[in-house]
Image (tube, helix red, strand yellow):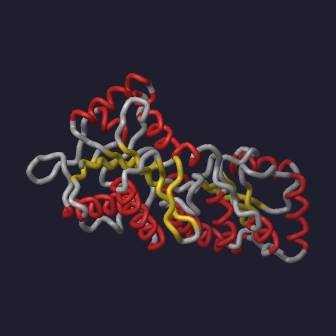
Amino acid sequence: MRIGVFCSGGDAPGMNACTRAVVRAALAAGQEVVGIRRGYQGLLDEDFHRDADGRPLMSARCVSNIIQRGGTILGSSRSDEFRTDAGQQKAAAILKRHEIAALVPIGGDGTFTGAIKLRRFWDGQVIGCPGTIDNDLCGTDYTIGFATAVNTAVEAVDKLRDTAESHERMFLVEVMGRHNGCIAMYTALAAGAECACVPETPTDVAGMVDRLRELKKRGKKSIVIIVSEGDEAGGAIALNDKLVAAGCPFSSRTVTLGHVQRGGSPTPADRILATRLGECAVRAILDGKTGLMAGEIQGRTTLTKLEETIAAHHALPVDLARLVDLMSI
């Protein structure tokens, strides 16, 4: 059997570790692996990773020394062509021509939406792996790349706190998360921030200003607020403008971390998660399963229907906001 593996959408630390796991688990089971470069667009362009002999196959050595590397050796992209029925039919024909019987797409909701649509025209097996820093997919406690993104954000906030303390200033730090506040909430808790503004809950500007005044009276000399890019108040810059207009008692600055959260060497937690899920995906394919995502829930690998993984956004743990507020006194 030939198994195709590719990364699609935004890159996430740990994608290389997952690719490595897919390749080595498949080869150990006597299967062939085709590495598809640049996601769905690379599939449409028939852009395959080639071995030393020029064959479109991956060997165990192709994935040597990549478990610690950020990004993805296969590259990633988004494809307008693939979003059309014609593009999906073309992709299905290419998979058949190259005798690829199964796919392991590594990505987020857009990647899995594409896989669901592809299955209308192609009868091969599909087992996805959740590679996205947003941690917004159902069917897994954590997605590949989330732990590293939080670690990157926390390191940045730790440095900003030094400046905030020195100048008795407030910093609003914008992190990624268009529809999900996991990065913001986990970063706020781990970095000791005074507040987290996330898409899942309304942002009460007047209430925040009252809280900031109270904290200043208690002797707080610095404030850090973590803001999801998708917060309904409009991100860090827009929220800062609203706080200033409402009488914020602190001098303030904004910082947008942006794509720096996607990069860097994956943490051990992400490397282990990626390895477990990549191997789980191959095992599921060998068991004849399809249309599923490999995930991890309460320490055990699981399989969830692709449609269910994107039907809703992964819910924030209910106690995190309370803890952030409690720890800010």
In the displayed structure, does residue 81 sit left or right of residue 293? left
Q: Residue furthest left?
A: 53
Work out whether residue 308 or residue 325 is closer to the camera in this orientation and state it.
308
Quarter-wise, where is residue 175 in the image? bottom right
Pick the front one: 269 or 73: 269
- The image position of residue 253, as x and y in percent, is 69, 58
Q: Relative to the observer, which residue lies in front, 253 or 210?
A: 210
Residue 260, given in percent of the width and then of the height, sits at 49, 57
Q: Residue at x 24, y 52 (%)?
A: 33
Residue at (27, 32) in percent of width and height: 94
| Quadrant for the C terminus in the image | bottom right
Asked if 259 appears above or below 80 in the picture, the reply is: below
Residue at 36% over, 36% down: 123
Q: Nearer the viewer, residue 17 or 210?
A: 17
Q: Residue at x 86, y 70 (%)?
A: 215
Q: Residue 295 location, x and y as percent?
A: 50, 59
> How many circles with numbers are drawn on the protein?
0
Question: Percent position (x, y) of residue 19?
Answer: 33, 58
Q: Residue furthest front?
A: 288
> Can residue 138 be seen?
yes
Q: Is residue 194 above or below residue 119?
A: below
- Furthest toward the top, the residue is 86
